[in-house]
Amino acid sequence: MPTWHPAQYLRFGDHRTRPARDLLAAIGVDGPRTVVDVGCGPGNSTALLAERWPGADLVGLDSSAAMIEQARRALPDGRFIEVDLREWRPDAAVDVVFSNATLQWVEDHAAVFPLLLGWLAPGGTLAVQMPANFDQPSHVLMRELAASPRWKDEVGGVLRESPVAAPQEYWQMLAPYGEVDIWTTEYLQVLEGEDPVTEWVRGTGLRPVLDRLDEDAAAAFVAEYSQMVNRAYPRQDDGSTLFPFRRLFIVVRPA
């Protein structure tokens, strides 16, 4: 897992939280006793769950100490655990397992999804959202730069080509478990500020590269990437930058 910086991640908090709201709206569970937020990050998604189900026993899991610390500050009454999701088991079956923009960082989805489904009580729901934007310029240019002669010895191969599979593959994987609802949404995000797409990926997709480089090299990589990505996402006449972003949603209700 990369090193996370909550403040950088939350620079675009509204945009990052919107898919969590849309995922939550698709969960038809009333009055769950226990809800687990897998990859709770700084607590922005956990706050939505607490608002929707104030009476639930709510548990937030994340492997990042910095994210857990931020989540505890944001929701002091919450229960947050620093742990790798593959090493955690609930004390009892849970009613909702929720994961917003996390599982793209976890390999072997063929094993991870059944693991999460195994946490559910009868009538429970697994709800997952993952970015599906890895074929777009923001990520393609990042991988191309990392593989270039200037950078390949330091960060070549650090970035995964496509950590999220096609919707059809998830349906084939999950359909044997019960009712599966899968869809994609592309958000036309209107970003403000200088180098906004670069600043966006500094909080997420660029983290594995930045973790490998020292401060000077990281600054040089970011500067070169920014020139490339600013051409791909030019500033609009009003100063904003349009950043289309596609996301994959999966809701499973086991039989």
Image (spheres, helix red, strand yellow):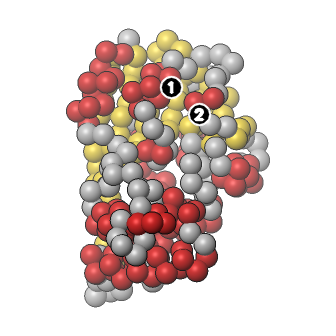
Residue 103: image x %, image y %? Answer: 46, 41
Residue 181 higher or lower than 177, as above or below: below
Q: Is residue 8 left or right of residue 237?
A: right
Disc 1 packing (10 Å; few <14; some 14–19; many ≥20): many
Under mark 2, the amino acid is: Leu
Q: Which residue is mark 2?
A: 85
Residue sitting at 69 percent across and 18 percent down?
Answer: 91
Residue sitting at 32 percent across and 55 percent down?
Answer: 134
Residue 204: image x %, image y %? Answer: 49, 59
Q: Quadrant of residue 15?
A: bottom left
Residue 183 higher or lower than 189, as above or below: above
Q: Nearer the viewer, residue 10 or 159?
A: 159
Separation of marks 1 and 2 at Cα, in angstroms: 9 Å
Q: Mark 1 near mark 2, Cβ–Cβ under 8 Å?
A: yes
Residue 148: image x %, image y %? Answer: 34, 70
Residue sitting at 62 percent across and 62 percent down?
Answer: 5
Q: Which residue is mark 1?
A: 116
Q: Secondary structure at mark 1?
A: helix
Quadrant housing the C terminus: top left
Q: Which mark is residue 244?
A: none
Residue 241: image x %, image y %? Answer: 34, 77
Residue 64 higher or lower than 114, as above or below: below
Residue sitting at 41 percent across and 42 percent down?
Answer: 129
